[in-house]
Amino acid sequence: MNFSSKLLEDAVGEFARLPGVGQKTALRLVLHLLNQNNEDVARFTQSLNKLKNEIQFCKTCLNISDNEICEICASPKRDHTLICVVEDTRDVMAIENTSQFNGVYHVLGGLISPMDGIGPTDLEVDSLVKRLENSETKEVIFALSATMEGDTTLFYLHKRLKTFDIIISTIARGIAFGGELEYVDEITLGRSITTRVPYTNSLSR
Amino acid sequence: MNFSSKLLEDAVGEFARLPGVGQKTALRLVLHLLNQNNEDVARFTQSLNKLKNEIQFCKTCLNISDNEICEICASPKRDHTLICVVEDTRDVMAIENTSQFNGVYHVLGGLISPMDGIGPTDLEVDSLVKRLENSETKEVIFALSATMEGDTTLFYLHKRLKTFDIIISTIARGIAFGGELEYVDEITLGRSITTRVPYTNSLSR
């Protein structure tokens, strides 16, 4: 692209480094911000600087938090004997939005992915093991993506945790609510038949 | 959404105000930036602050520029008697990328759009008229979008400029290069037949 200004080019270049944002989108976003008030742009950049400088990771569950211990881990209303292991903050938010889980979390910070050079030591596995040693955890629920990386991580974690006297479970896989049978992929449909559940169990939502 | 951190919520809120960016995309972008080095994030916000504070608009053509007069207007290689009127900076960049235009520009800063409350006084029309009065312009080319707003603006500008002794032209409309006839919309195809050009003219690219 042929920029009329070096300042514009720099800003567009920075935006274009964001995931899923190309040069054209970056230019559109930058020109939008350029048309905003000075205060709006200052608030935009300040919110980002503040986030980057002041954000903390909960010492217990490693979730993004404003304090040393996050609200979920600090809450006495939560069941601290039930730990849900997730990949990242977005998964915590997704599960919290369901209002179906009353335990606490452990954020791995990623999934094992040899292709991307991410091994078990890059994840918060040791902290999970230490946490299980020092607490009265009854059950660990794995809520990981149903991908190759998720399954690999699940397999590894199960091996690491099987010496503990706790229940290890994973979230149910199957056909989504509202999903039509004919559009479901074969693996999901096949597995959902082999792992069928008694009708009365399926009602307990 | 259920944010675990107020800082995160603020930053996501700011990103979600950008055009075409929803809450989920905003969260993805913010978490991406959170995973970057401090320097990368600082460079990101600084480039934006610098752009906002130091950017200028060329005193002649009103295009975005690093200096009082933009490079195009300051260039002696350009034909200053030929002015191309465009909506915004992106159009200048698009035309510059073609390398087919050697004149100078005039950036209107928008198009007349009664639906959005944008009238002729909100655009740089008076500055264009003043520029024509004080210069030896031979031709004004309108390169505006082929939309209702573009046509309205074109109609208004033509009325304002017709007292000047200059050639007024618009960029050619028709079927795009590489376009297949059967997929072209009816209006474009119909107009391209009524405004057909001699074959020899169409070769002069």
Image (cartoon, coloured by chain):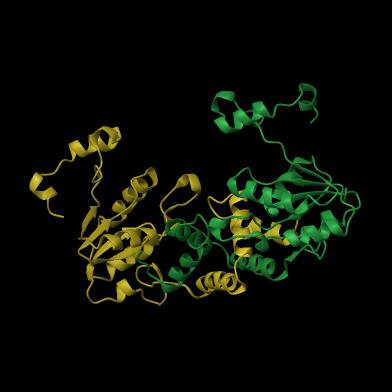
Chain colours: A green, B yellow
In this picture, is B16 found above or below B105?
above
Question: In the displayed image of the protein, which residue is found farthest to the left?
Answer: B200
The quadrant the C terminus of chain B occupies is bottom left
Q: Residue at x 49, y 56 (%)?
A: A21
Between A185 and A126, the one lying in front of the other is A126
Q: Residue at x 24, y 42 (%)?
A: B175
Q: Residue at x 18, y 36 (%)?
A: B193
Residue A119 point in image, percent of width and height: 62, 60
Residue B22 point in image, percent of width and height: 59, 49
Between B4 and B151, the one lying in front of the other is B4
Residue A12 point in image, percent of width and height: 46, 65
Count of numbered labels shown in the rendering: 0
Determine if residue A61 is in view: no
Residue B76 relative to residue A121: left or right: left
Quadrant assignment, res A7: bottom left
Between A65 and A160, the one lying in front of the other is A160
Residue A2 point in image, percent of width and height: 34, 66
Residue B93 relative to residue B99: left or right: right
Between A59 and A93, the one lying in front of the other is A59
Question: In the displayed image of the protein, which residue is found farthest to the top?
Answer: A199
Q: Residue at x 35, y 62 (%)?
A: B93
Residue A26 relative to residue B173: left or right: right
Determine if residue B74 is in view: yes
